[in-house]
Structure formats: structure tokens, C-alpha cells
Image (cartoon, coloured by chain):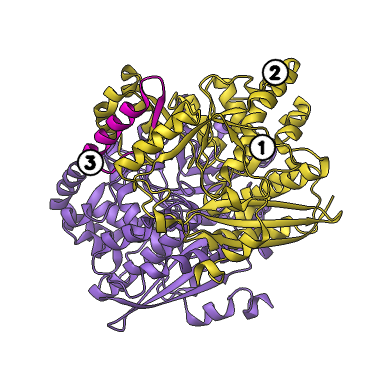
Chain colours: A yellow, B purple
Amino acid sequence: MKIISLGAHDVRFPTSRDLDGSDAMNPDPDYSAAYVVLRADNGLEGHGFTFTIGRGNEVCRAAIDALAPFVVGQPVDDLGEFARRLTHDSQIRWLGPEKGVVHLAAAALINAAWDLAGKAAGKPVWRLLADMSPQQIVDLVDWRYLSDALTPAEALGILEAARPSAGERIAFLETHGYPAYTTSPGWLGYSDEKLVSLAVAAVDEGYRMIKLKVGDNLDDDIRRMRLARAAVGDGIRIAVDANQRWDVAQAVEWMTALAPYQPWWIEEPTSPDDVLGHAAIRRQLHPAGIRVATGEHVQNRIVFKQLLQAEAVDVVQIDACRVAGVNENVAILLLAAKFGRPVCPHAGGVGLCELVQHLSMFDFVAVSGSLTDRSIEYVDHLHEHFLDPVVIRDGAYQVPTAPGFSAEIHPSTLQHFSYPGGPAWI
Amino acid sequence: MKIISLGAHDVRFPTSRDLDGSDAMNPDPDYSAAYVVLRADNGLEGHGFTFTIGRGNEVCRAAIDALAPFVVGQPVDDLGEFARRLTHDSQIRWLGPEKGVVHLAAAALINAAWDLAGKAAGKPVWRLLADMSPQQIVDLVDWRYLSDALTPAEALGILEAARPSAGERIAFLETHGYPAYTTSPGWLGYSDEKLVSLAVAAVDEGYRMIKLKVGDNLDDDIRRMRLARAAVGDGIRIAVDANQRWDVAQAVEWMTALAPYQPWWIEEPTSPDDVLGHAAIRRQLHPAGIRVATGEHVQNRIVFKQLLQAEAVDVVQIDACRVAGVNENVAILLLAAKFGRPVCPHAGGVGLCELVQHLSMFDFVAVSGSLTDRSIEYVDHLHEHFLDPVVIRDGAYQVPTAPGFSAEIHPSTLQHFSYPGGPAWI
């Protein structure tokens, strides 16, 4: 299979008008996608995207154009080689390396290639991955900079150990789905009444964990956390998310004030770049039973490696589009398994739920083999724009069955929300 | 002063045709600048740029366009506020945060604002900075994420301690300049003969340190290092630079093989994101007397903070355009002073020598107060394109005296090397 053309779209949803997605660092996001369509010489299409929150989405699109020569006219059968080709051009690498805009663009293209591969194989991507041999999976990964924490041989061992019981876990997923938690009640822009009613509704719908945004005002956070705990009772986990708002000491102080309400984890307490800062926060919050989670803004496998080496996180939060797509996320799943940490993906935004369900299901079937303390974030926004939207039942993601990566957006949506010329913006 | 317009240029020099700048990770760079001109309402112009090595320079230009609304029509008198405005838009921040393409673009604009400020004050930027009060300098910095390593009060103390003797150091610089080392002999694409003759010439010209690129082939590196050591003798320092080529164990092994030739430092032994990797390499190379240096690709103050906290580097290498310009480099100089590490800037490329001389001279006068083990990289390429090029005498940068940041490129160069339409490219 060879790619014969690449189409790129700047798609933006005016979500800031309703304060959906508002948090302490992102008061007015317009959920957006730099969206690509790869056309193959056999007539198939691969769709993929990276997620942004509005301004600058056009810069990701420019980076996609810069990577186009490494895609158009090129083969796409070896997805390990394909991904490395997109991250190792020496001149473009200078702009990262392997981080920020150029990495977001690589994610869109690599994810699109996986959508294409799933369609070509007639399988959803989670199943395509799970059906690969351990050696094929190892060969997907760019091993550079990982050998002090995980070698290909160790990864092979992890995958081979999981393999004999993979069929049982596939059957389990097909019956029960994969656990979800929901962030829908907890946006910072919502009123107390909306918070409480959405929290109660979430429990009624079968969720075992909800998440609240924190970090703007401590008194507000204490009040919201108290209301939420009273609404859901002690048996439901409440995670909180500061979206990088604090320095180290402030994170410890703030979370200590929230400790009486038993937060399950504090997510992004400080800069995603600050491995040592997260480690210091974790050490100090450990006695209060508060876990540390991060990852949605962690730039690549090298920083995830260090978060694990430094014992800086209890929970690894992969993002489908921040790192270089499926391939780099496979590396991160293997690292997390080696260090015995659960992976609970970041989702929401536009289409992130659709993508990460595949990665978590693959993780359960072929890598970690476990659901303990694992769940995928779920936010009930914008799914109606996808051809194969996620299905949640009883607080669990149901297995996707359509071939591909569930990444495809309706053509009418691409047109309506096209920025800046689409009807939604004029 | 208010900015009334912003012009952006994509300028590229076809340096790959001569293998200037070739190293183990960057075999064929075309030195490039995403170049901006800010026009102020008083008729003055501020020039600035970020440096890339070719492909993708247009993505930096797109990011500059995305930041334009935070510049055009806006005041530029408070340069601390100006810099923070460019790095804290919540939607654009999502693309980093504070790293990669959006940070390179912020660097170009912030550096241009400093060029403007220097011209408005009638001073070169190093002197404009050195003449500020300690509190004014502290106010330039974005302190978020730094307080676990350095507080504004500690920074004030460092600056106040240096202040009484600043005049003596200014007089010293005006007489002797600031020490330089040269990378010109050591590009990987050069023949042994060219290496030896350029190394000998460098010593004759007064340099006390040269640098060689390594990391492509160990036998070649041993031979080149032996030839260079024989050519310059034991009294001249030879630094080596692997440009991120190795994993941790390989870095230790390779450098152990080069140890008999007394390399002064190993630069970028592994990923610039790998704080813990650098720390492990440093621990293992310390017995052999080999220092670890890094920084030209270190994305922001948060990673520099950790490199210092983890004792991962002996030498801090700032880059004028990788982090968010002068302001973030002031933060990094203060961090290095707090942790007692020398700063030896990365330079070369296009115009990096012109910019960093100002930062090192400010460091000497107002922050570290020391020249011990400090020197600025010098590469003799492309200076002829600048209105106020660096002046090197007896292996030292002579103080720039023209108002501004020495950043301005001749209009004829901007036109000739414009990409893709300029005469140099068609």
C-alpha cells in the first residue's frame, strides 16, 4: 500500500461559548482538530488528527504540510518504519526534537496511517495491534533513548507473558467493555447546582469515578469537593485535575487542604516538563493517600520514561495525539508495564475518546493484562461528529468493531466547522 | 512605545552544499532564520529571529503569524509583561506548553523587542540589561515553576551581590572581551587534513578551546581526537559534541574510549529531554574527569532547573533562540548562578554568536561575576550578513557597542536568501 495524496483540514468547534472544557489554565478552549485524510493507491482512506484548543491549530496544519513529503508517494506497510520516518528527518527534528507542534503533526499522520491499516486489515485498531506477534509489536517502537529503562528484549518478555491469556481478556472486553470515568460534571465554569446534578447523574449511569477541575480558587475547590463528595458518597472515586496550575509547594499545600474529601488522584499538579517536581509532590502527598497522575501534556516517551524512573507518578496518562501516535504510545504502555504503573488515558476534546479506547483495550489484552485501577476518561462532547463514535454502557467503553481507528469525522462536520470559512464561524 | 506592524521572513542559507555544520544527527543542515521586523510607533525597528536548519522554517513563520495579535497594536515598554503575553495565551500554550515551534516563534519576537528596546535606549542589549536594577531584572522573569529551585528573593540577592563590582567587570570586558572557543575545525564532514590545519590555526588565533563533533563512528572519533590532541598539545581544551546521538550506556562506553585524549566536556551525549539520563552519564564519567554539557536543545527554564537540581550537567549551554528569548535566558542565568555552574552558550548557526555575546556579557557583569571555565562558542560562518557582526580578537568576543541586539541582517541578504523565491534558491 502506498499513499497517493494527503488532504489537511483545520476544524474548530466553538466550545468556548458554553464554557465546556473550562479549567484553571484553559478558560475558553475551542476544541479543534488538525485533521488529515491519507488516500492509498488501493482506494482506501486513512483519517487521523491531532487535537488543539483553537488558536494555533493552523500551525499544526502547517507542520503537517511540512511532513507531507515523507508521506505522499511513500509506502505505508511497515508502520514502525513509517513512524520513524516522520520523526527523524534531521532538519525538521531541529524544531523539537520530538515535541510540540511537529510532534502533534506527526501524531495526526501516524494515527491516520493506523486507521488505514485497520481498514485494510478489516479490523479495529485495538484488535489489529492485539493480533500482532510480540516481535512485530516491539518493532513498532523507536527504541532510541529508552535502553536505560527498558530494552526490546524486556518488552518482548512482557508481551510474551501476556499472550497465552489474551483470548480470555478479549472475551471479557466483548462482554463488559473497558471501565470509564467521567469529567463531564467537573468543569470549572459550571455552577454548584450543575456540578451536583451531573455528579449524581454520573453515578446513576454506572461510573465509579468522576473528576473535578481545581486550582483556580482554594475556597471554591473545597466547597465543590465537599459538595461532590456528599453527592456521590464514599464509594465513588473523585479525581481532581489542576491542569499545571501550581508550583511544587503550592501543589502540596492545596492538596493537603482537599485531603479530607479523599481525592483519588491529583492530575497535572505542575508543569508537565517537571519530572523532579512531580516526584517531590508525590513524596509529600503519599502519606495523605493522594496519588499523582500526569501525561496529557507529556511530550514524548523520554519524559514518560523519567516519570517512571523517578517514581514521580502513580498513574500514567497517555494522550492519543500529543506523542507520535500509536507507535510512541505502544512504547509508553510497555514502559508503564515494566514499572508496574496503571495507564489511564486522557480523553475528551475532539475524538480523543474515540482513539484512546483502542490503546487501552490493546494494553489490557496484550501488555498489562490488568484492569486494576485503570479507566479511560470520558467526556460527553462532540461524539456526534464521528462516523463510529464511542459507545458507553454502564460506565464502560464498549469494544469498537468497525475496521479502523474510529477517527473519521462526517464530511458535513468538516465543512460546517472548517476554520475560518465554515458556517459555524461566519 | 507601541508596535504598529510585524514583518516576517523565511531566510535560508544553502550551507548543506559544503557540509558546514555537519554532525552525527544533522548531516546536511541549511542554516535558516525565521526573521521578524517589528516597527514601533516612534519609527524605530526591532529585528529578531529564531534559528532552524532548513525544512520547517516555514512552520516557525506560521507560529510567528499566530502570535502576531499579541504583538501588533500592543505596548512594548514592559518587556517582562511582553514576554509573558507571548507565552501564556491559553489556546496557543496547548501546542507546547513553552516548547518547540511556538517557543521558537516567541523567541524571535521577544528578541526583536529587546533589539528595539536597545535601540530606543541607545545601548547594546548587554549594557541595557546590566544597567537595570536588580528588581527590574527579577521582574523580567516568568517565575512559574521555579520556586522549588530559586525564588525571586534569592535571585535579587544574587544580583545585589554582583552589583557593587559591576563597573570593574565592564571595564575588563571593554579591554579584553569575553573568551571564545571555536567549533570551526570539528565538523564531521571535514577531512582529517582540514581538521588538523583548522585546529592549529585556531590555537594560532588565540583560542584556548576547540570542539569536535563525535558520535557517528568510534574508530573515526578516536583517530580524529588523537590527531586534534597531537595538533594542539595538552594546554588547549578539546570539547566534544555528540548531538544527542547516544543512549546512556553507549555514551559512557564511547566517552570512556575517548578519555585518553582528555576531552574537556561531552556535549549533548543523549536526548536533551533526558535529565536523569544526563545525570547517570555524568556520575559515570566523573572519575575520568570528563564534564557533561547540554542546553542548545533544552526547551525551557523548567528543564534547565531540573538539570541543575539533579546535578546532571557541569556546563549550562544556553541558546539565544530555543527558549523564549532574553527573558527566559535571564531566568536560566540566575538558576545557573544559584547552583554554581558556568554558562557557556551555544552559538554558530545564523546569528547565534551575535545574540549570545550580549547574554554572556550580562551574565559576567551582573549575575555570575566570573569568567572561570566560561567561554562562548564561536563559528566563523555567515557573519557577513549582519549589520553589526561579532568581532573576535585574540580568541575573545569584543564588546558590541551599537545600540540593539546585533540581530539585524542586511536587506540584500534577506532578499537574496529568501526561501523559496530568492536568487540563492532558484
Circle 1 chain: A
Tell which tag, 2 or 1, sits nearer the viewer.
2
Residue B398 placed where, x, y %? 35, 64
Q: On the image, which quarter does residue A65 sit in?
A: bottom right
Q: Does dot 3 land on a helix, a strand or a loop?
A: loop
Residue shown at the point (57%, 44%) measured from the top left = A352
Query: Magenta residues?
Result: A214-239
Left or right side of A386 for A128? right
- To which residue does mark 2 refer? A162
- To which residue does mark 3 refer? B151
Which disc, if any, is residue A142? 1
Q: Nearer the viewer, residue A188 or B275?
A: A188
Magenta span has A218? yes
List the single residue furthest toward the right: A42
Magenta span has B112? no
Residue shown at the point (27%, 28%) measured from the top left = A258
Q: Nearer the viewer, residue A4 or B350?
A: A4
Mark pair 3, 1: CA separation: 39 Å
| Image quarter in which the C terminus of chain B is found | bottom right
- Type of amino acid under label 1: Asp
Q: Is residue B417 above or below residue A29?
A: below
